[in-house]
Image (cartoon, rainbow, N blue to C red):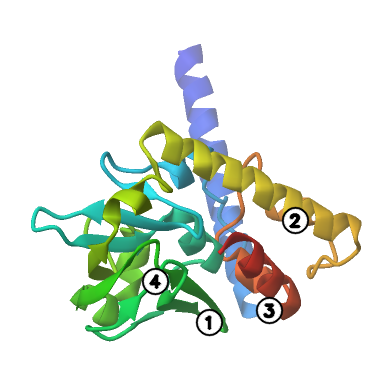
């Protein structure tokens, strides 16, 4: 009997708390107050450094994957997508464009921030992923797998591959890049140039990872400096 009374008391208290909180939220909404934010999902370095088997990654964060017919597909890893906070549009160079390593292949845009994807290889653009033109957000959600941006017929592919990273080397390279990015943001903080009026480390909630959409939290000058250093 005592146990039943205790259980009934607990249920009553929980019910009262539920309706009290619901009533408070309704009052806040009527008064124009913002509702409590949901907790930010916790990420780990592996979320930004995962690279599928057989995919090469190079400086500038473009990846390259070999196709059976001898062409290569090129896309971007998760780091630039995370910095931009997703992708609104992707503007790729036209089919037939001849590029050299470091030439622009595409421009990624999110809001008023953009980022160039530079070719890791010399070659001729033979195809553009149709998804990139109509659903850039999907490319951002799946930067590998079906998230390639352009296909090229390469020249001197063997020499190019020696300059890129694959498997454990690719993951190590991305972890090192995240460390350099952290140091860059800390440098902004110590220089008193933080765009948010708070230390730059406040934008690194998950043990050194940049928050999604970091680009929008930086000034134009800071974003341009970040692009020059890392892309």
Q: Position of residue 17 (x, y in %)?
A: 59, 46
Dot label at residue 185: 2
Quadrant of the frame with the C terminus: bottom right
Instruction: Tell me if I can see residue 45 in this picture.
Output: yes
- Disc 1 is placed on an element classified as loop
Q: Residue at x 57, y 50 (%)?
A: 39
Determine the CA span between mark 1 and mark 2. 21 Å
| Label whose residue precedes the other's in the sequence (4 or 1) | 4
Mark in front: 1 vs 2: 2
Dot label at residue 100: 4
| Label whose residue precedes the other's in the sequence (1 or 2) | 1
Instruction: Give the class, few, some or many, for how many residues have Cα within 10 Å of label 3's Cα (few <14, many ≥20).
Output: few
Mark in front: 4 vs 2: 4
Determine the CA span between mark 4 and mark 3. 58 Å
Determine the CA span between mark 3 and mark 1. 30 Å
* 1 and 2 marks in contact (CB < 8 Å): no
Quadrant of the frame with the N terminus: top left
- Depicted 58 relative to depicted 196: above or below: above
What residue is pinned by disc 1? 111
């Amino acid at each position: 009997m005592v146990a039943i009374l205790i259980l009934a008391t607990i249920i009553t208290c929980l019910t009262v708390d539920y309706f009290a909180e619901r009533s408070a939220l309704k009052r806040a909404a009527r008064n124009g107050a913002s509702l409590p934010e949901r907790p930010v999902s916790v990420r780990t370095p592996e979320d930004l450094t995962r690279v599928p088997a057989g995919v090469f990654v190079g400086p500038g964060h473009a990846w390259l994957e070999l196709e059976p017919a001898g062409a290569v597909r090129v896309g971007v890893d998760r780091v630039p997508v995370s910095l931009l906070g997703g992708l609104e549009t992707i503007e790729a160079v036209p089919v037939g464009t001849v590029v050299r390593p470091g030439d622009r292949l595409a421009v990624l845009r999110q809001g008023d921030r953009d980022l160039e994807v530079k070719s890791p290889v010399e070659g001729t653009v033979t195809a553009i992923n149709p998804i990139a033109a109509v659903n850039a957000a999907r490319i951002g959600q799946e930067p590998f797998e079906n998230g390639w941006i352009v296909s090229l017929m390469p020249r001197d592919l063997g020499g190019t591959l020696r300059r890129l990273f694959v498997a454990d080397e690719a993951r190590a390279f991305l972890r090192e890049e995240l460390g350099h990015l952290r140091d860059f943001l800390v440098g902004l903080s110590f220089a008193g140039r933080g765009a948010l009026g708070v230390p730059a480390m406040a934008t690194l909630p998950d043990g050194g990872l940049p928050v999604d959409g970091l680009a929008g939290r930086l000034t134009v000058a800071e974003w341009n400096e970040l692009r020059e250093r890392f892309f």
